[in-house]
């Protein structure tokens, strides 16, 4: 698949990398249709994070579920979803209290994790054609419409409403047996996103 890769301080490139795949039963594989470029990507771009060359960047995708693992119950292939910036399990004690940024199950040896970010776990980024989304029942926020519509063109599907805030993703929803609702996740990058689009529908 094609992806945007950090290659060194103030250097990124579009590169061919190994396809993302399902790795756990609760994963989905997302076909990314648009992916924001965030101000927080600049910490890596500018060399402030210790990011290593080869890191696939991006943490704010909109896309369509391509494949769903056998344990996924709340989304199915063909569903259009936004994926919150940081990933979380939805059922640990911190997630159930709305503190999903400190999820206890997504990063061995630490807490909290994010896609495509130095020091935030092994998860590859979303400025790519495909993204593995762990704990998909918690992390997929279904949205209406179709690829190429106003939401997809705007590329502003994240950044305003951090999880746990009114209107933001409800990370405890999966624990309560219903789909998480709300919009994107990265409050830090809000207002500074730029549109990034991938070829295709
Ligand atoms: Zn959790
Ligand atoms: Zn961001």
Image (cartoon, rainbow, N blue to C red):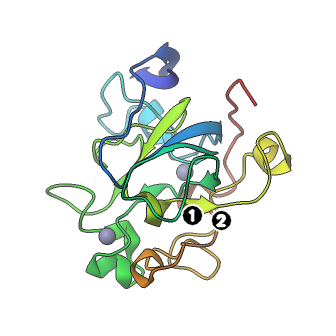
Quarter-of-image position of residue 61: top right
Q: Is residue 110 left or right of residue 140?
A: left
Decide which of tag 1 and tag 2 comes sooner along the chain. 2
Q: Is residue 34 left or right of residue 70?
A: right
Q: Is residue 106 left or right of residue 197?
A: left
Closer-to-camera residue (187/112): 112
Mark 1: few/some/many CA within 10 Å (<14, 14-19, 20+): some
Quadrant into which the C terminus falls: top right
Query: Is residue 10 visible to the viewer in this orientation of the structure?
Result: no
- Going 84% across and 45% down the picture, which residue do you hit? 149
Tell me where residue 82 appears, x and y as whole percent: 61, 55
Tell me where residue 128 appears, x and y as whole percent: 53, 30
Question: What residue did someone put label 2 on?
Answer: 160
- Going 81% across and 39% down the picture, which residue do you hit? 148
- Going 58% across and 37% down the picture, which residue do you hit? 31
Question: What residue did someone put label 1 on?
Answer: 187
Q: Are marks 1 and 2 in contact (CB under 8 Å)?
A: yes
In this view, 84 is above or below 195: below
Disc 2 is placed on an element classified as loop
- Going 50% across and 78% down the picture, which residue do you hit? 164
Residue at mark 1 to residue at mark 2: CA–CA distance: 5 Å
Q: Name the disc covering residue 83, or none.
A: none
In this view, 164 is above or below 135: below
In this view, 53 is above or below 114: above
Quarter-of-image position of residue 94: bottom left
Q: Is residue 73 left or right of residue 90?
A: right
Disc 1 is placed on an element classified as helix
């Amino acid at each position: 698949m094609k992806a945007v890769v950090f290659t060194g301080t103030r250097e990124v490139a579009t590169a061919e990398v190994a396809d993302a795949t399902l790795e756990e039963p609760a994963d989905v594989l997302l076909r990314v249709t648009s992916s924001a470029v965030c101000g927080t990507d600049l910490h890596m771009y500018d060399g402030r994070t210790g990011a290593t060359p080869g890191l696939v960047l991006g943490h704010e995708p909109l896309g369509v579920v391509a494949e769903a693992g056998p344990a996924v119950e709340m989304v199915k292939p063909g569903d259009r979803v936004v994926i919150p910036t940081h990933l979380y399990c939805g059922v640990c004690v911190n997630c159930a209290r709305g503190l999903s940024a400190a999820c206890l199950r997504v990063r061995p040896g630490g807490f909290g994790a994010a896609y495509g970010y130095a020091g935030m776990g092994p998860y590859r980024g979303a400025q790519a054609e495909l993204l593995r989304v762990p704990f998909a029942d918690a992390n997929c926020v279904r949205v209406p419409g179709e690829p190429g519509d106003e939401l997809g063109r705007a590329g502003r599907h994240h950044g305003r409403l951090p999880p746990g805030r009114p209107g933001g993703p409800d990370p405890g929803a999966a624990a309560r047996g219903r789909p998480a609702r709300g919009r994107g996740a990265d409050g830090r990058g809000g207002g500074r996103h730029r549109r990034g689009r991938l070829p295709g529908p």
